[in-house]
Structure formats: C-alpha cells, structure tokens
Amino acid sequence: MSSLFPDYLSVEAKDLAGGHNVAVHILGDAESIAHDMSRKMADVIREHNGGATLIIPVGPVDQFPLLANIINEERLSLRDCVLINMDEYLTDDDEWIPPDHPLSFRGYMNRTFYDLVDPELAPPAENRVFPDPRDPDAVGRLITQRGGVDVCYGGIGINGHMAFNEPPEPGETVSNEEFRALPTRVLSLSRETRTINSVTVGGDIAVVPRRCITVGMQEILASRALRFYCNRPWQSGVVRRVLHGPVTAACPASFLRTHPDTSLTIADYVAQRPDIRLR
C-alpha cells in the first residue's frame, strides 16, 4: 500500500490477530455475526443463572430478535439480569428523544427485544437501564451495587468510538489517562458519527440528533470482559486502526488492547484489507 497511508491499513486479514492481546474471530456475513452475538449473550446469561449484569449496544442491532427467540425457546429467565444500554440520542434540550422517535434506542429495544420476550422470563422494567441525562451518575452507582459488569458488548464507530465516547475534537487536549477515566455523561456527537449514522437512516445528516448520553470509558473498561462486534463494510479500516494503530484517545476503541479479556468478532468482508481507490 502507498506510503501516503498509515501502515496499519496494509495489515492482511490473516495478521489482524497478531501483536496484541485482543482475540480476533473472523466469521462470515452479517447474519453469522448476529447469530454468534445472540448465542454468546445467551450463554453468559445462563452461566450467571439469569443474574448477569451486561452493558449492551444498539449497533450492532440484528442480534436482539435472535436473542429473544433463544431466551423463549430455552426458557432462560432474565428476572435478575440487568441490561444497561450504552447510549441514547437526546433532544437539543438534553432530554431523551421520545421512544416513538424512529431513531430512539429505547424504542428499538422495546420493539425488537423486550416486547418479544415471554413476560415470565423478561427482566423487570427497573432492570432495563438507559443512562439518564438527568442523573448520569446513576449508571455508576448501579454497577457498584451489582458488583461490577460481567460483560460489555459493543460495536466500533467510524472514528473508533465505543458507545458514544467520541474522540477529542481538533484543538482539544485530553490525555489518555483522562480519557480512559471519562464517566457516563452528556455530550455532543461528532460530525463523523452523525454522518456515518445518517447513511443507515436515509442519508440526510439533518435527521440525526446532535446530542447524546453515553456510558463512559470508565464503566466500559472496568467490565470484567469486553466482547465487540463489527459487521459494516466501512469498518475494515477502523478495525485495523483499533488493532494495529497507536493506543490513543484519538481512537477510543484502541483501548480494547489494554484490557485483559477482550475479543473482537468481525465479518469476513470487514477482515479484508481496505480497497482504497476511486470507483
């Protein structure tokens, strides 16, 4: 690859797992990613006898109906399970967008997961947790009360964000230590995030909210295990940056490499080296 580009972009699929402690798993298509993620989530719930504390994303998304089916078929009770969603979009007044908003993560979780689970097995309403812009610290208090997070699941954004932990903006100085310690908080979404998210909802950045609340780097990195998944074709480059670029706040998911129990599961087309050319 041209010397104009970062060295990490030249890493071949077979070499993605080398030189760091992240376990890299390459599967097939997006459907195989969803099936693997739903199966692994169900297995963790079973291992903890329905009492797991999990951080979960909306993105990837396709695993949730599959997980609901597994729970119903295998009669896995979630009555003592706490599910903490990573983030949610906010209005310009820093309130949750309403659950009937087409982009609401709360609405999505209801439609594609909670409403599909047998009520006898479903977690009670108080265990279906989203970070609250009126009390961001509540997530940390809950995690402490529960004795920590068993597994944090997630995806990776175009700029390397985990949840909505956006990298520092140009001109903003944040040390790696300061960034790692960022707690659950309200913030503005980066233009990069709003742009790539608009691609999946019709292509108009104007429909993507500007504000959000996110579970912090602090809570994510303190989880006992990190299980991240990538199924978008555009993630081929950022996956290489995460695994083989510098560990830096400029690419938040690079901090996955600092955790002792981390895996990254990706589609085979994400594993392929980026094809950088005009076409």
Image (cartoon, rainbow, N blue to C red):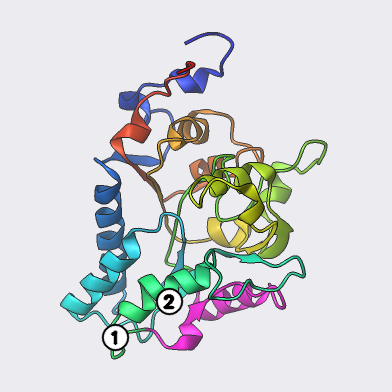
Mark 1 and mark 2: Cα distance apart in space: 15 Å
Left or right of 50 in this view: 192: right
Secondary structure beneath label 2? helix
* Viewer can see residue 67: yes
Determine which residue is flagged by label 1.
121
Q: Position of residue 55 (x, y in %)?
A: 47, 66
Establish if 48 lies above or below 58. below
Secondary structure beneath label 1? loop
User: What are the residue bounds of the magenta stretch?
Assistant: 123-148
The kind of residue tagged 1 is Leu
Q: Does the magenta stretch include residue 125?
A: yes
Left or right of 183 in this view: 163: left
Q: Position of residue 12 (x, y in %)?
A: 36, 21
Q: Where is residue 104 in the image (x, y as percent from the top left)?
A: 54, 68
Left or right of 29 in this view: 185: right
Give the label on residue 110, or none: 2
Q: Residue at x 35, y 87 (%)?
A: 79
